[in-house]
Amino acid sequence: DYININSNKEVTSSLIDKLRISEDHRQLLHMGVDPIAIIRTIYLKIFKNIHQGASTIEQQLIRTITKRYEKTIRRKIREQILAILIRNASTPDDICRCYISCCYYGYSTYGVDKLLIKYPDLCEYSIVARIKYPFRKNLDLRTEKKYRQRSLYLNQLYEDNFK
């Protein structure tokens, strides 16, 4: 579960599995856009006034690469089209590797290599937890608690699905 940056900069298949569990558990079932997540999000917004995301790992990769974060339908449609194109041109594992290698982990930290320079002893669950909760310039106890809780939750999901 630990990645030693000095001996192994490669993104492992178990880290990819943990990313999928955390960010897009249906990644292997869709082609870049998750219609189930979109329907769920629309339902929750209309009937319960709950905002929830429906972005796939492919869409998150597109957003990270393009650095387009505006909250518009146009951006989402562009992301969805590009996500489908990327998925058709690449494998799900390669998309995950690319995303882990460039995603935002917090204050001026993009990519797992940079994250592990700052925090060399992180387990894979903690690496993935930091995608959901990027850190600020100064870490505080509340943020650390979020990481621990998210890591434990992901550990349980992983155990339930892969063991």
Image: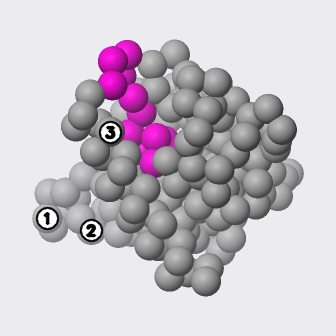
Closest to the observer: 79 or 96? 96
Q: Which residues are magenta?
A: 127-139
Give the secondary structure at mark 2: helix
Please give left or right for residue 52 compared with residue 69 in the image: left
Which kind of residue does numbered mark 1 sit on?
Answer: Lys
Please give left or right for residue 95 compared with residue 75 in the image: right
Which kind of residue does numbered mark 3 sit on?
Answer: Glu
Please give left or right for residue 141 compared with residue 157 in the image: left
The span from disc 2 to disc 1 (Cα, nearest Å) is 8 Å
For residue 7, what is the image quadrant?
top right
Which kind of residue does numbered mark 2 sit on?
Answer: Tyr
Instruction: Give the residue at mark 3.
Output: 144
Give the vertical position of 162 relative to 39 (above or below). below
Give the vertical position of 27 relative to 10 (above or below). below
Closest to the observer: 56 or 159? 159
**Residue 149 seen by the camera:** yes
Q: Looking at the picture, how far across and down is residue 115, in whole percent?
A: 59, 29
Single out the mark in the foreground, 1 or 3. Answer: 3
Q: Residue at x 55, y 30 (%)?
A: 119
Instruction: Give the residue at mark 2.
Output: 43
Q: In the rendered structure, does residue 129 fall within the stretch colored magenta?
A: yes
Q: Looking at the picture, how far across and down is residue 19, in whole percent?
A: 59, 56
Give the vertical position of 106 relative to 22 (above or below). above
Q: Residue at x 48, y 66 (%)?
A: 155
Q: Residues within 10 Å of mark 3 (few under 14, many from 20)?
A: some
Instruction: Give the residue at mark 1.
Output: 48
| Marked residue nearer the N-terminal end (2 or 3) | 2
Q: In the rendered structure, does residue 62 fall within the stretch colored magenta?
A: no
Q: Are marks 2 and 1 in contact (CB under 8 Å)?
A: yes
Give the secondary structure at mark 1: helix
